[in-house]
Image (spheres, grey):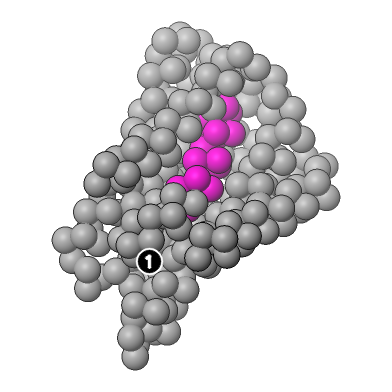
Amino acid sequence: MEAVLLTALGVGGATVIGSLIGFVFKKISHRFSDIVLSFAAGVMLAAAVLGLILPSLEYGGQLGILITVGGIFVGALCLNLIDKLVPHLHKLVGSDDEGHNNTNLSKVLLFVTAIAIHNLPEGIAAGVGFGAGDTAQALIIAGGIALQNIPEGMVIIGPMLAAGVSPKKTFICAMITGLVEVVGTLLGYFAVSIASVILPFALAFAGGTMLYVISDEMIPETHAHGSQRGATYALLVGFCVMLVTDVLLG
């Protein structure tokens, strides 16, 4: 339980770390953020398959393939529904310059709310990873999610400051988005701990949410600013790092 709590704080804290970087470097290049985000996407892609989807098949028994496929699509559809209710990152802010010059406070607050809402299923994915009993694998899954949260925390700061929100309130908002991820991690862990029968579905559900985030948000975002070649290789490096780590720890 101690490892789960520390992981939850680490995953949520990554958003806060990103926000602190955003305060120091208010104009971070797209190329840098795209490379970091793509590396995280590669780690998350491998983690979703190796740490969540394959274990779901193993724990699912005779109906494993049906449970896993169903869980993947339910997870993706849930995030799809969230996207329809509250659009995310690039759909709200658009380009970096647009985000910094935007003085519409309601739009900026909607942007921050979108990040917070999307952080909940990501936190659940981190918590569910511990339900499989493989702590090393769960920590790697959480690490990939944390890497994604750093650039998300970075992009919160500029639009809020430009909209006239005080630095103190801006930082509090960033902390709240991170806290949502902490709650999600604990929810995911306790859900599979209380009802282990749902573990195969929960693992596949978490894997589906991660695949959706990677395909729908992370890859398009990292390919939108002219750095797609570097972003592609960064994703491959992240995937291979996760693959090698899984073999070494397996």
Please give the name of the residue rendered at 58% of the width and 28% of the height, measured from the top-left corner. 155
Disc tally is 1
Span of residues in magenta: 141-156
Count neighbours of disc 1 (C-alpha within 10 A) and say few if under 14, some if 14 to 19, many if 20 or more: many
* Disc 1: which residue: 203
| The stretch drawn in magenta includes residue 42 | no
Where residue 109 sits: x, y (%)? 44, 27
Amino acid beneath label 1: Leu
Please give the name of the residue rendered at 67% of the width and 47% of the height, measured from the top-left corner. 38
- The answer to which of 196 and 117 lies nearer the viewer is 196
- The answer to which of 152 and 242 lies nearer the viewer is 242
163 up-or-down from 222: above or below: above
Horizontal arrangement in the rendering, residue 3 relative to residue 250 (left or right): left
Residue at disc 1, secondary structure: helix
Horizontal arrangement in the rendering, residue 173 relative to residue 192 (left or right): right
Q: Quadrant of residue 96?
A: top right
Please give the name of the residue rendered at 33% of the width and 73% of the height, measured from the top-left corner. 200
Q: Residue furthest bottom?
A: 62
| The stretch drawn in magenta includes residue 149 | yes
Residue 80 in view (yes/no): no
- The answer to which of 224 and 130 lies nearer the viewer is 130
83 up-or-down from 27: above or below: below
Please give the name of the residue rendered at 22% of the width and 68% of the height, measured from the top-left corner. 196
Q: Main secondary structure of the magenta part?
A: helix
Where residue 189 sits: x, y (%)? 27, 53
Residue 241 in view (yes/no): yes
67 up-or-down from 46: above or below: below
114 up-or-down from 128: above or below: above
Where residue 207 sits: x, y (%)? 46, 63
Where residue 1 sits: x, y (%)? 24, 46
